[in-house]
Image (cartoon, rainbow, N blue to C red):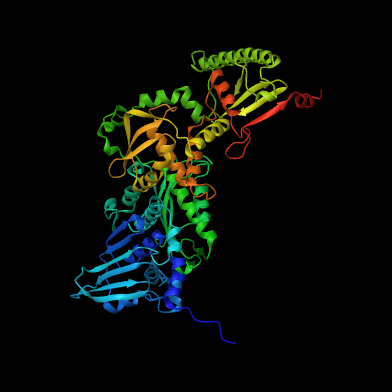
Amino acid sequence: MADIIQLLPDNIANQIAAGEVIQRPASAVKELLENAVDAGATHIQLIVTDAGKALIQVIDNGKGMSETDARMSFERHATSKIKAIDDLFHIKTMGFRGEALASIAAVAQVEMKTRKEGEDLGTYLEIENSIVKKQEPCASAVGTSISMKNLFFNVPARRNFLKTNAAELRHIVDEFMRVALAFPNVFFSLMSNGQQVFYLESGSAKQRILQLLGNQYASKLVMVKEETDYMNIYGFAGKPETARKTRGEQYFFVNNRFIKSAYLNHAVMSAYQEMIAKDSFPLYVLFIDLDPSQIDINVHPTKQEIKFEDEKIIYAFVQAAVKHALAQFSIAPSLDFSLNAEIQQLESVSKPFSSDQQESAASSSLFKTFTQKNQAHFIEPNEKSELKHWKEFFASSKENIIEKEAINNTQYSTANTQQNLLPENSNRKLSTDALLLQIHNTYIIAPTGNGFLLVHQQLAHERILYERFSVAAHGKRMASQQNLFPATLELTAADSVLLQDLIPDLSALGYIVEPFGSNTFVIQGTPADILQGNEKNTIELLIEQFKHFSSDIKFSKREKLVRCMARQQSIKAGQQLGQKEMHQLIEDLFECNTANTALNSSPTYLEFKEDYLDRMFGR
C-alpha cells in the first residue's frame, strides 16, 4: 500500500500561515507598520487604496536591508530578532514571528525597494504567490518601501469574506492608531484613495493622544506615572467628566505593544469607583514597561493578548497608579497664581491681617463653632438667621405636595371607577378622558376595566421607535425635512470613516448627511418627526453608541443602528409628561407587534388585575 503522508509545498504552507497572520487588510497594515518601527524609522507613511484590497504601501526611512536580507525576509520563519531559544523570552521588538512577509507574499503581489546607509544602490524585489518574479538593483532612498497589491488575488474565497471598503478602512484606522499611539516620537501619515486621513508630527505622548482622539480632551487628561523596581506605568487617564455611557477610548500597551485585557481594564474601572456612574466608561491610554521575561506574548496569534507571570501584582500597580493620579487631580488641583496678576492685588492677599481683625474673627460665633470641641455641626439658634426661611419654604412646599396628591388621588380613584380602558378585545386603547398618573417621572399608571397597567415610559417608547425605524430601515424610507441652516460636523479621522459607512443606512432613517472635505460632514436633513436644532449632537452620540455596540455580532449593522436610534431618541426616565403625551405613548405602544417586551428583553409594562389586588389585601 502506497504511503499517503507528504510534506506540503511551500506556497501552500505559506497560504495556511497567511490564514492565521493575515486575516484582513488591517492585519497586513499592523505587521508592516511594526516592521518599519523595528527598523528604527522616524518617518513612516501608510498609503491604502480601496481599504487595502487594491494596495497597501508602507514607506519608512529605517535602516533598510542588504540584497541578501531583502530576499531572505520573505522566507518562512526568517527573522533578525531571534538567534537562540532564550531570545523568545526577552523580546522587546514588535514584529518577531518571522512569518509576516512570507504570509503576505503568499496571498498578494508584493513589490519592495530597500537600501542600506552607505550603499550606492538598493534592491528591487517582485514576488507573487511566494514566487520571486524579479530581483535587481535599483535607485532607492535609504529605508524600505513595500507595496502589497490585490490582497487574496489567488484565494478568491478569502477575498469574498472581506467586508465593505468603509468597514475594512475602519479596521485599518484602528491598527494605525494603536501603533501611532505607542510611538509618539515617530512621524506617521495615512493616505486613503489619495486623501490625507492622518498627518501626525512627532511629539509627546499627550500631543499624540490629542492628535488622534481630539483636542476636546486637552484639559481633561490626568497624568499617570509610577515607577518601581518591578515595573513602570505611565500615560493618561480621563477626568471623571470624560466618562461616557458607552465604552470610550481605552488603550493598554505593554512594552509598547497594544493589548486587550479585561483583567487590567477591571483594575482601572475599580480605581474610578464612586467617581463615575457604574454604567459609565472612562478614557485611558496607559503604558506598562516591565521585564519581557515576566510576560508571555505567544498566547495569541495576533499578540493582542498576553500572559503575565504575576497578574495580581500588575493589577494592584495599575489600580494604585490610576487611583493616585485621580486623587491628586481631585484633592489637590494645582493653582498658578502667577498666571493672573490681578489676584495679587486683592485686599485679602495684599493687606496684612491686623490684630483687631484677628480678635474680631476669633470672638465670632462662627469661629467658635469650628474651634470648640464637639461643635463642628452646631448652628446657633438666631431669630435673624436666614435658615428659618428655608424651613418655611420646605414646610409650605410639603403642604402643597400633600394637597396636590390628595386631589390627584381623588381624581384617580374616580377615573378608576369609570373603567376608562376599553375591554381586552379593543386592543387596550384608552378613552380620551382617562386620567393617567405619572410616578417619579418614569412610570405611568393607566386604569383598566379590571385593574391597572404600570408602564415604563422609556422602555415603552424605545419599543415604539424601534418598530417604526425597523420598517424604515428595511423598506419604507422615513420622510426627511430639509434643514434651513445645515449643521456642520467635524469628527476625528476614525469616526469620520465610521460615519461614511453609515450614511446609506442613516438616509433610510431620514438623516441626509453629506461629506464636506477632510473629516467634515454637513447634515442637510433630519427625520420629519424630529425637532430640528440638535442634530449635530444626535449624530455624534449615535456614532459613539454604534462604535461600542458593534462588538455584538448577533445583530447586523442596520439592526444595530436602528437599536441605537431607538435608545437615543426615546423619552427618558425622569422626563415629565402631560396627559396627552401619556395617552399617545400608550396608544402607540399597543399598536406595536411586540408591545409587552423592550429591546433588552425587559417588560414594557406590568398588568395588575383586580382579583390579584384583592388577594394582596386579603379580601
Q: Position of residue 184 (x, y in %)?
A: 32, 56
Residue in the foreground of this view, choosing between 419 and 207: 419
Is residue 325 at all visible to an observer of this figure? yes
Is 313 left or right of 488, judged from the image as shown? right
- Vertical order, 225 against 361 (above or below): below
Where does the image place residue 391, in percent across and percent down from the top left? 55, 16
Among all residues in the image, which is located at the extreme bottom? 1
Q: Is residue 475 left or right of residue 217?
A: right
Depth check, front residue: 557 or 332: 557
Give whichever of 517, 412 is nearer the camera.
517
Residue 440 visible in this rendered orientation of the protein: no
Q: Quadrant of the C terminus?
A: top right
Q: How many marks?
A: 0
The percent coordinates of residue 93 (x first, y second) are: 38, 68
Residue 398, by quadrant, is: top right
Query: On the rendered image, what quadrant is the N terminus found in?
Result: bottom right
Could you say which quadrant of the image residue 36 lies in? bottom left
Q: Residue at x 63, y 35 (%)?
A: 603
Work out whether 371 lies above or below 419.
Answer: below
Residue at (33% x, 68% y) in the render: 109
The image shows residue 325 at horizontal and vertical percentages of: 43, 48
